[in-house]
Amino acid sequence: MQTLPKQMPMTATVAIHEAALDTSGDTITTITGPVVASARSSRIDLPCGSIAYTTAGSGEPLLLIHGLGGTRHTWRHVIDTLAATHTVIAPDLPGHGGSNAPGGDYSLGAHACALRDLLVALGHTSATIAGHSLGGGIGLQFAYQFPERTERLILISSGGLGPQLNPILRAATLPAAYLAVAGLAHLPRPLTRALLPALSVLPGLLAHQDVGAVVDALHGLADVRQRHAFIRTARTVIDWRGQTVCAAGHLGLLEQLPVLLAWGANDQTIPPQHQHAFARRLPTAHLAEIADAGHFPHETAPQRLLPPLQTFLASTQPFRYPPPAKAARRHLPRARAGGHHAGRHPRSQS
């Protein structure tokens, strides 16, 4: 494993609607803070529905995937710097922010397909995939489903690496969760900001660095459509015991792909032990532990996260998937002597 410096053709008929800012009326999708002059917010009609997204910069494409219940607004502190060297694409996932809700499938695979459709529609055959939390799990799924479209993989406080998860998100899958989330989301923001710090004193609930980010995310769920997407998506990857989807069985497929694991040292949402275990099983991974950060290092410590991101992007070469015939030979079982097939499933590559 490599530790980076801590301080440092599917075809689709589409229609694109561009504007200086998203005009959907949903203020939580607006990108605020410093952005590069070329940044623009747009909408595009895809088979999964209308997707809202922001693009900025030029160069190799870099796709940013937000987390559960979030929006592309979460990348506002890093998009400007990343756009100096890359074409940054930051969408709202289906059902989140300004994007239309899907027909009913909120699974990791469905989100990965929607992002594949977005890249194809924008004219990109492949991209570096970066995801935060749930977005990391979607990124892992994307790399598994579409290895030929994945150049690098950046996992920030990623889900999908182990079962443990804080009780707050596990509770979001319980029967009464919809009403509870609705009640919390409609509390006055000053009251929420006053109450949440009390949770940060209890172990395993909330890092004190994340209070502001969680307040923003929680109040975004006041929108009924956003709240519906949050609950439906959560139940595809979480139950009352923790995370139900794990990528550990497919790590062998990532051996040649440049992978960066970044996480906050004080993450109370997904334990850092998941990243450590992942790194032991994938020794080629690049690592960046962000000191004094919780689950949202890209929001609360962007000045410490950006240097290792930039170093990783500059020091690694985009992965190129083998031609289809060669790729098939790598994963198909060998026939036994005499030409008779063994009749068994291929041995796991993990």
Image (cartoon, helix red, strand yellow):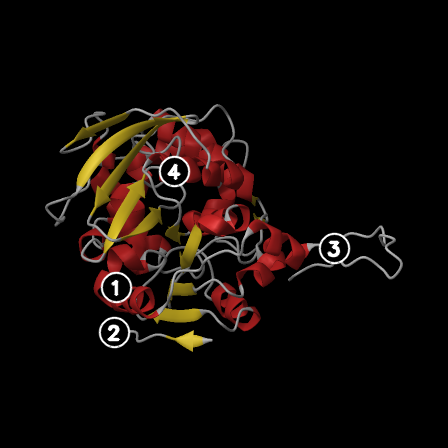
For label 4, the SS is helix
Question: How would you rate the neighbour count of disc 1 (Cα within 10 Å): few for under 14, some for 14-19, many for 20 or more?
Answer: many
Identified at 41% across, 35% down, the residue is: 117
Q: How far apart are marks 4 and 1 (CA)?
A: 27 Å
Sooner in the amino-acid sequence: mark 4 or mark 1: 4
Q: In this view, does 314 lie to the left or right of 145?
A: left
For the residue pair 249 and 267, the one nearer the viewer reads as 249
**Callout in the foreground (2, 4):** 4
Sooner in the amino-acid sequence: mark 2 or mark 1: 2
Q: Residue 120 carries which label?
A: 4
For the residue pair 106 and 140, the one nearer the viewer reads as 140
**Callout in the foreground (1, 3):** 3
Within the image, what quadrant is residue 238 found in?
top right
Question: How would you rate the neighbour count of disc 3 (Cα within 10 Å): few for under 14, some for 14-19, many for 20 or more?
Answer: few
* Amino acid type, label 2: Gln
Q: Distance between the residues labelled 2 and 1?
A: 8 Å
For label 3, the SS is loop
Identified at 33% across, 54% down, the residue is: 198
Sooner in the amino-acid sequence: mark 1 or mark 3: 1
* Amino acid type, label 4: Val
Contact between labelled residues 1 and 4, with CB atoms less than 8 Å apart: no
**Position of the C terminus by quadrant:** bottom right
For label 1, the SS is helix
